[in-house]
Image (spheres, grey):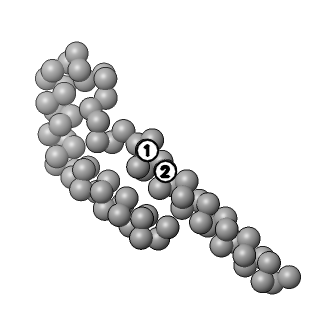
Amino acid sequence: MLLLEIFYDCHNLLRDMLHCSHLVNLSSDLLDTPDFYWDREELEVLYSKTCNYLNIARRTKARSTLLGRVV
């Protein structure tokens, strides 16, 4: 009985990690400039500078790499 519970726990953790990996890699739009900024050039520049300052691309890549190692 204990072994079956451990199996289910591992299965659920793996499912959650795969779901998180999917959200990061396929559903995330962190690397794309939202449509809202396309018509507002001055805000688009500010958005780009903010993303660069916060290292969004590097952080997203690191998170994706870590999830890939786990899964």
Residue 13: x %, y % from top left: 61, 67
Residue at 31% x, 29% y is 34
State the residue lying farthest toward the bottom.
2
Mark 1 vs mark 2, CA separation in Å: 5 Å
Q: Say above or below: 40 vs 71.
A: above
Please tell me the numbered disc located at residue 26: 1
Mark 1: give few (<14), some (14-19) or many (20+) Cα within 10 Å.
Answer: few
State which quarter of the image contains the N terminus.
bottom right
Residue 1 lies, with reference to residue 58, above or below; the image says below
Left or right for 45, reference 1: left
Give the image quarter of residue 39.
top left
Q: Amino acid at mark 1?
A: Leu
In the image: residue 23, left or right of residue 13? left
Compared across the picture, whether 25 is left or right of 41 comes to: right
Residue 52 screen position, x and y as percent: 16, 46
Disc 1 and disc 2 in contact, CB within 8 angstroms: yes
Q: Residue furthest top?
A: 39
Tell whether 31 sits left or right of 6: left
Residue under label 2, please give it: 22
Foreground of the two, 31 or 54: 31
For the residue pair 11 and 39, the one nearer the viewer reads as: 11
Percent of width and height locating residue 33: 27, 32
Numbered circles on residues, count: 2
Residue appearing at x 54%, y 58% in the figure: 18
- The answer to which of 24 and 36 lies nearer the viewer is 24
Q: Badge 2, how many Cα within 10 Å: few under 14, some, many 20+?
A: some
Which mark, residue 59? Answer: none
**Dot 2 lies on which element?**
helix
Extreme residue toward the right, this view: 1
